[in-house]
Amino acid sequence: MKDKFEQIIEGTRQVSLTPREKADLRGEVENMTRKRLGWPAYLALVLLLGTGVSFAAEGALPGDALYAVKTSFNENLRGSLTFSREARANWQARIVERRLEEAAELALAGKLDADTEARLASELEEHAREARELGDEKVDARLSAALSAHTDAIASADTGSGTSGAVMMSAKIETGTALELELDQQAGTLEAAIQELEEDLKSEEAQINAIGNTEIDF
Amino acid sequence: MTGNTSNKMERAFLAAYDSYADALFRHIFFRVHDRELAHDLLADTFARGWQYIESGKHVDNMRAFLYKTAHNLVIDEYRKHHEQSLDAMAEDGFDPKDHVGEGAVYAGAEVKQFTMALERIPREYREVVLMRYVDDMSPEDIALVLGENANTVSVRIHRGVAMVRKELGLNEEEKL
């Protein structure tokens, strides 16, 4: 005869992963073991970030020779060393912040051209999407905070020069955010929505310019 | 070439996942009482475990090793958020139950009582009772996880179970 204690213990066995959770996590573990990174990669990361090209590249902006090292090498390597879902979401959010910081820096220097702005915006959308897929509300909040802080900075940096580039950049960024939910819809819908948003922004831009003219004295 | 050994390691690690993921999840769940957190800590357990193995360190007893890794992560988590007692959580309106599926986690009131009883006994006893009964580990393996000797662990299991039984209002039983 089983005693009460044993019956209770048996009841605890019902706590388990759902088959879906178990399969998903297995996939992650499998990827991790295939990557064969681990210690040597950590070592490489420490050495590279500690000295040399990779470290120098950390400060690179679009258009700089080392920019590709920053995005293709440094960021990918760091990303591949991030395992938990939360850490990966945060790292993707950090990349979004990095793109925004770059855009703001370029805008401040008056060097944010249309090509760069389009590239940054599309990269940003991609990483923001990934961060959202992986993360929870905390990550969403982090993204929104970063977006609003930087779009303001970019827009105000831009009013002085009178070009619309940076404003469009922030528009695209916001579009990316707003359209997040609709991404599964056809590309046509997406483009129409972008156009609509751009039109909205023209009036906003006019306002910003007006403010810029009164407050910023060159 | 290390290719072969590496493949073997990968396979062994994945096999360990297949065998122990559910039990580890259960173990972590009963220690943190939060399904999502338990899931994250489980993922971290395998990530840390693999990093350790990849660094070339040898693991004799995979099961004990994974429990030890999970155990350390749980302790870190406790330290991060101070230890929140289940009673305090219940006062805040926390009611331990599963958030996924049909709510099957605390299937019976009894399992819930068991969880509350576990929370009321000191942590060092709670750990061993969980590992011995819920995870069905031998005192030797538990000793490996905790870095203690098997005798100490056996004594602790014995006392821990007596405490849980007392909390549950069950009679002492020699058989255990």
Image (spheres, grey):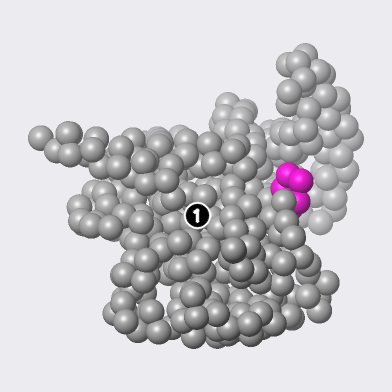
Rendered residue at 48%/61% (across/down): B135
Q: Which residue extends farthest front?
A: A1
Q: Which residue is mark 1?
A: B23
* Residue A86, x across and y down, in percent: 57, 52
Q: Is residue A163 above or below residue B26?
A: above
Residue range in magenta is B99-103
* Residue B175, x across and y down, in percent: 49, 75
- Indicate the quadrant containing the N terminus of chain B: top left, top right, bottom left or bottom right: top left
Identify the image quadrant of residue A121: top right
Q: Is residue B65 magenta?
A: no
Q: Is residue A191 above or below residue A108?
A: above
Q: Nearer the viewer, residue A188 or B3?
A: B3
Q: Is residue B36 visible in this depiction of the protein?
A: no
How many C-alpha atoms fall within 10 Å of the one at disc 1: few (<14), some, or many (≥20)? Answer: some
Rendered residue at 80%/49% (across/down): A212
In the drawing, does residue A52 fall left or right of residue A139? Answer: left
Q: Amino acid at mark 1?
A: Ala
Identify the image quadrant of residue A11: bottom right
Q: Which residue extends farthest left?
A: B1
* Residue A178, x across and y down, in percent: 79, 36
Main SS of the magenta part reads: loop
* Residue A119, x across and y down, in percent: 57, 29
The chain containing the residue under callout 1 comes to: B
Q: Is residue A182 visible in this depiction of the protein?
A: yes
Q: Nearer the viewer, residue B143 or A79?
A: B143
Q: Is residue B79 above or below residue B65?
A: below
Q: Is residue B101 magenta?
A: yes
Q: Nearer the viewer, residue A65 or A28?
A: A28
Instruction: Determine whether the residue tagged by mark 1 lies in a helix, strand or loop.
Output: helix
Rendered residue at 70%/44% (across/down): A158
Q: Nearer the viewer, residue A211 or A177?
A: A177
